[in-house]
Amino acid sequence: MDRPVARNLGVAAFLMFMLSIPVANWMIGHVGLVCVPHEACLIPVAPGVMAPSGVVTVGAALVLRDIVQRCLGARYGLFAIVAGALLSALIVPASLVIASTAAFVLSEFADFAVFSPLQRRGFIAAALASSSLGIVIDSMVFLTLAFHSLAFLPGQVIGKLWSIFFAMPLIILTRRLAPTPA
């Protein structure tokens, strides 16, 4: 397909990825079935398994990050993280901004290490592999810095896996619209 269509998809993914950071951070303190004061609002992600509510947005963000890299190039993903962190600083406590930014940056570097070399062989496999690694790194870093505990790690991983599952049609569409990396 032509590059302008892929570029437009990349720009849309860039904006959604950038906004996913402040949205996820805001959700943690405001959206959930159970909200623990000065902690996190929780949602169920599997029977008997809860996770901080931002997990849904972050799972989608990991896929959006791959689409940004595929359509626009790697540096745009890093720029989206910085812009998202700055927006987050306007609406959530600094501790969440630091935790989420560190988690996104570290998982971004892991994503580059996995996604970049694999995407030429197969975009879908590369997106799934890098997102899976990103899930674990992002979750461990965020939970450790934000809550000083990995108690919600199973919920984080399960919730983000659900997001990736629901993002599969977008991954397939991206492969069609951007058959080669930017």
Image (cartoon, rainbow, N blue to C red):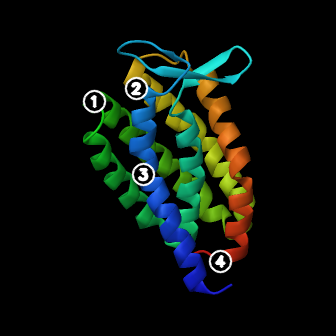
| 79 relative to 71 in the view: left or right | left
Few, some or many C-alpha atoms within 10 Å of disc 4 (few <14, some 14-19, many ≥20)? some
Residue at numbered disc 3: 19
* Residue type highlighted by circle 2: Gly
| 23 relative to 116 in the view: left or right | left
Q: What is the count of numbered marks?
A: 4
Image: 61 above or below 94: below
Q: Residue at x 49, y 56 (%)?
A: 16
Q: Residue at x 50, y 72 (%)?
A: 72
Residue at numbered disc 4: 180
* Residue type highlighted by circle 1: Pro
Rendered location of residue 65, percent (x, y)? 53, 56
> Does the image show residue 84?
yes
> Does the image show residue 182?
no
Of helix, strand and loop, which one carries label 1?
A: loop
Numbered disc in front, either 4 or 1: 1
Q: How far apart in space, not on screen, are marks 3 and 1 (Cα)?
A: 17 Å
Q: Are marks 2 and 1 in contact (CB under 8 Å)?
A: yes
Q: Are marks 4 and 1 in contact (CB under 8 Å)?
A: no
Q: Residue at x 31, y 35 (%)?
A: 98
Residue at numbered disc 2: 29
